[in-house]
Amino acid sequence: MSAKDYYKILKVRKDASAEEIKKAYRKLAMKYHPDRNRGDASAEEHFKEINEAYAVLGDAEKRKQYDMFGAEGFQRQFSQEDIFRNFDFGNVFEEMGFGRDAWLGRMFGGAGAKPRGAYARSSAFHGSPYGAGAHSRKGAKPSAKGADIQLELQIPFHAAIFGDEQTISYRSGGKQERLVVKIPPGIEDGKKLRIVRKGEDSQWGGEPGDLYVIIKVIPHRDFFRDGQDVRIVRTIRMSEAMLGTEIDVPTLDGKTLRLKIPSGTQSHRKFRLRGQGVPGLRGREPGDQLVEVIVQVPEANTPELQRLAKKLAETGN
């Protein structure tokens, strides 16, 4: 299954709302519906792509996975059955006045044309364990899925900010497995990545379980994260706080910016560097970098410093 840009297929922005996605889907589905394009193979193929795109972007969890892994990563890990699982197009088509069409089984299930009404039982839309396009027989029981595996993955601070690829090693079914995991940019500590069918094999002929990777971000020596913002602490002398100064501030992407500190700056004051925080996802604005300034008060351990301290005291400071 080749990588597909579902946002382009539905002609919506990456930050489109659920309602905008549904509206775009309905418009395209009406345009390319096979009942309106009889004998047009290209329209039918396009209609299949539209439905596939909506099955993913119209489902909050699948859309989240698609955005995290990207088009190629998503389609390496999600089969056609995964994409259409638990997605009932019947209600959508009935709302548009088309009904539960017999051609749905042919297009998505691969099991040939079905009588009207049989579509609702297709596993491509309801997640039957018998496989895409199969129909459950009366009295038959689905095969049990294999056990899920859960493990922790420690990643560097910058990998969580900008994304990365990490190779993990784990045991499944008594064998040592190796897998490259794509870390999406902006992922937070404690988040889980689900990698389908990379868990334990089923003992009853069902599909394998899933692998859940829990992300543990290694703290950075200088940077601290707060949502989309990052914070860094810098120390200045008391004389610099009183008179004003300029300091060098490192940023997440390795640059160094010059920050002006005005005279009279108090300890723990925060300065904001716009757009220097965690990169934005799905077209959102990036976060900011906050620079917290700590004023270092010298010890009055020399006669001259003691005289200066007394003069400050005389002025009421």
Image (cartoon, rainbow, N blue to C red):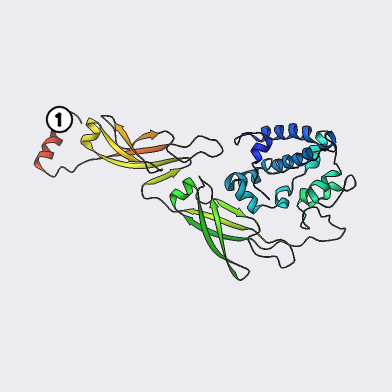
Q: 235 or 99: nearer the eye?
A: 99
Crowding near the residue tagged with mark 1, few <14, some 14–19, many ≥20 C-alpha atoms within 10 Å: few
Number of labels in the image equals 1
Q: Position of residue 69 (x, y in %)?
A: 58, 48
Place residue 143 in its image quadrant.
bottom right
- Quadrant (top left/top right/bottom left/bottom right) for the C terminus: top left
Place residue 255 in its image quadrant.
top left
Please give left or right for residue 57 compared with residue 274 in the image: right
Residue at 57 percent across and 52 percent down: it is 192
Residue lying farthest bottom?
A: 174
Above or below for 149 versus 246? below
Please give left or right for residue 55 compared with residue 73 in the image: right
Q: Position of residue 222 (x, y in %)?
A: 36, 47
Residue lying farthest left?
A: 303
Residue lying farthest right?
A: 115
Q: Position of residue 242 (x, y in %)?
A: 23, 32
Q: 313 or 101: nearer the eye?
A: 101
Q: Position of residue 197 (x, y in %)?
A: 66, 59
What amino acid is labelled 1 in the image? Glu
**Residue picked out by circle 1:** 314
Residue at 85 percent across and 41 percent down: it is 101
Residue at 71 percent across and 32 percent down: it is 23
Determine whether the residue tagged by mark 1 lies in a helix, strand or loop: helix
Please give left or right for residue 137 compared with residue 233 in the image: right
